[in-house]
């Protein structure tokens, strides 16, 4: 992939097709650099360098990058897949004994489970059944992503310090 940046434009082209994509900016230089960094991480041509199967869904880096929407919101599917990827990596490193001493074990609750906590008629006695797959004895942090309008909020149960954080 080739790209060219000036003060107002980023022009992207793929070597195989020579098609050009142009995105006009009227934003600050920092935002342009962030956009450039994200674009540089998306493989536009050829096979994706990494494809993972997470919960019977095949996902590649290009899909991750495109679904992150630079000026929008992260989709709930991307959030769930990234959470699964983070936890799978943590589990594998733990299994191999590669986690550093003092590592904070964490779990990211899937969006469909966490949105149940947002309902006004939520029955707290059912929370135990919802979270039976999680071993909180080993977890230091449990992340509960919540979505309202266009905004994501993250409630963190910090068991190591015995507090909740937003």
Image (cartoon, helix red, strand yellow):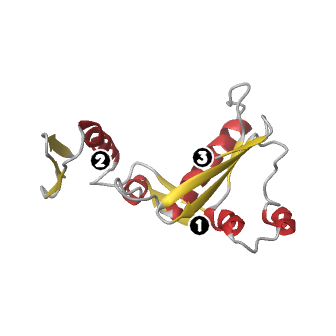
The foreground one among 54 and 83 is 83
Which residue is label 3 attached to? Answer: 86
Residue pictured at 52% horizontal, 55% vertical: 52
Q: Nearer the viewer, mark 1 or mark 2?
A: 2
Q: From the viewer's perspective, is 152 left or right of 40?
A: right
Query: Image point 85% across, 62% down: which residue?
Result: 128
Looking at the picture, tell me which residue is in the foreground, 154 or 35. 154
Residue at the top extreme of this rendering: 101
Q: Position of residue 60 (x, y in %)?
A: 44, 56
Crowding near the residue tagged with mark 3, few <14, some 14–19, many ≥20 C-alpha atoms within 10 Å: some
Label 1 secondary element: loop
Distance from label 1 to label 3 (Cα)?
A: 17 Å
Compare marks 2 and 3 and give the one earlier in the sequence.
Answer: 2
Give the label on residue 56, or none: 1
- Disc 3 is placed on an element classified as helix
Tag 1–tag 3 contact (CB < 8 Å): no
The residue singled out by tag 2 in the image is: 39
Residue 155 falls left or right of residue 46: right
Between the C-alphas of marks 1 and 2, the distance is: 27 Å
Horizontally, is 100 left or right of 58 in the view? right
């Amino acid at each position: 992939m080739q790209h060219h940046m000036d003060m107002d434009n980023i022009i992207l082209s793929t070597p195989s097709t020579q098609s050009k994509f142009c995105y006009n900016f009227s934003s600050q230089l920092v935002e342009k650099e962030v956009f450039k960094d994200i674009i540089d991480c998306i493989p536009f041509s050829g096979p994706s360098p990494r494809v993972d199967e997470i919960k019977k869904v095949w996902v590649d880096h290009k899909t991750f990058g495109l679904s992150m929407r630079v000026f929008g919101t992260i989709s709930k599917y991307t959030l769930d897949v990234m959470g699964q990827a983070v936890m799978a990596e943590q589990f594998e490193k733990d299994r191999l004994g590669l986690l550093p001493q003092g590592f904070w074990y964490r779990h990211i609750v899937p969006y469909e489970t966490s949105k149940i906590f947002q309902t006004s008629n939520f029955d707290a006695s059912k929370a135990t059944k919802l979270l039976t797959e999680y071993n909180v004895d080993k977890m230091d942090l449990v992340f509960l992503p919540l979505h309202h309008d266009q905004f994501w909020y993250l409630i963190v149960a910090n068991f190591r310090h015995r507090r909740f954080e937003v």
